[in-house]
Image (spheres, helix red, strand yellow):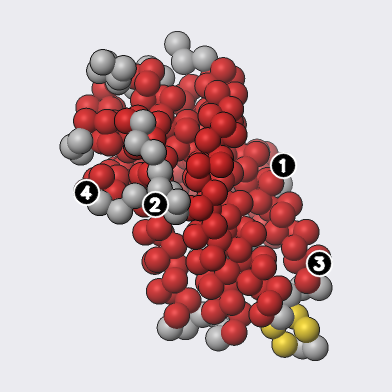
Amino acid sequence: QLPVLHVVRESFALAWAWRRGFLGGAGVLGAVGAGVQVATAATAGGEGLGPVLVVVDLLLTVFFTTAILKFGVKGAQPGPLALDIGIDALRVLAAQIITTLFVIVAAIPAVLIASVLMSGVLSATGASAPPTSGVPLSWFASLPAPAAIGVGIIFIAFIAAIGWVAARLSVAPAATVARGRLLILETWGWTKGEGVRILGTLALTTLPALLALLALGSALDALSGGGEAGGQPNLMMEAVSGFALGAAEALLLTLVGAALTIILWRGFDPEAGR
């Protein structure tokens, strides 16, 4: 059985040990994050340049992730920018896209089942149906206690089911780099019976990072006075905030997440270490 807490500790320990080698990549992603935030603030939503920078950020994150995976799996030293642009990055991108498609396909029946169950709960408790445009918290807060509990359980079960599918395939990027070819379905077999534990490791490594990023964002927003100067966007502060959040995300989410993937790969791939 997967030792959840040990794997989580090892993931943070690896990320901390490797941090200096990947500061260059974090800086690049921070610079792109600054560009996205400035473009969004300056053009009321970032029309034009903003979406382009978002795509660039996604691609650079793949290159950054690939550099981490190659270092952890093959011992390949990252360059000054800690970005790996090549065939391995294309394979990692393909693995991430295919994994996402698997999760989306799994979500379709899950949504249908959750909808049927939710309708049954609302009907049995006499509660009102959710609004057609989104499900605001005000609607959930207005539900009677039995309905709120039922809807909450259904929502948590839905998220857990989707997360379980993603967890079963979480080894795919590292395995793809290690084997030099796309590996998706094989990794599903490797993680049989361990989906819940892997999901636990993902939650325990991701949630602290998200909370830290939320706290950082709130602190930066407070320092900037809401990001405005004289009623106009404070572009300098937007740039500082975007850089800090982008770099922090690279180190707290991407680096730790890749370290976790490598540890899981080492434990599940029958050929790991050969």
- The quarter of the picture where residue 41 lies is bottom right
Please name the residue that numbered disc 3 is placed on.
Answer: 223
Q: Which of the two labelled residues, at mark 3 and mark 4, occupies the earlier sequence position?
A: 4
Q: Residue 219: x and y, percent?
A: 78, 59
Please name the residue that numbered disc 2 is placed on.
Answer: 83
The reply to whether the C-beta atoms of the residues labelled 4 and 1 are less than 8 Å apart is no
Is the residue marked by circle 1 packed among few (<14), some (14-19), or many (20+) residues within 10 Å? few
Please name the residue that numbered disc 4 is placed on.
Answer: 87
Q: Which of the two labelled residues, at mark 2 and mark 3, occupies the earlier sequence position?
A: 2
Q: Which of 83 and 103 is in front in this view?
A: 83
The kind of residue on which mark 1 rests is: Ala
Please name the residue that numbered disc 1 is placed on.
Answer: 145
Q: Residue 17: x and y, percent?
A: 56, 31
Which residue does the image show at 46% across and 15% down from the upper left? Answer: 2
Is the residue marked by circle 2 packed among few (<14), some (14-19), or many (20+) residues within 10 Å? many
Distance from the alpha carbon under mark 1 to that under mark 2: 51 Å
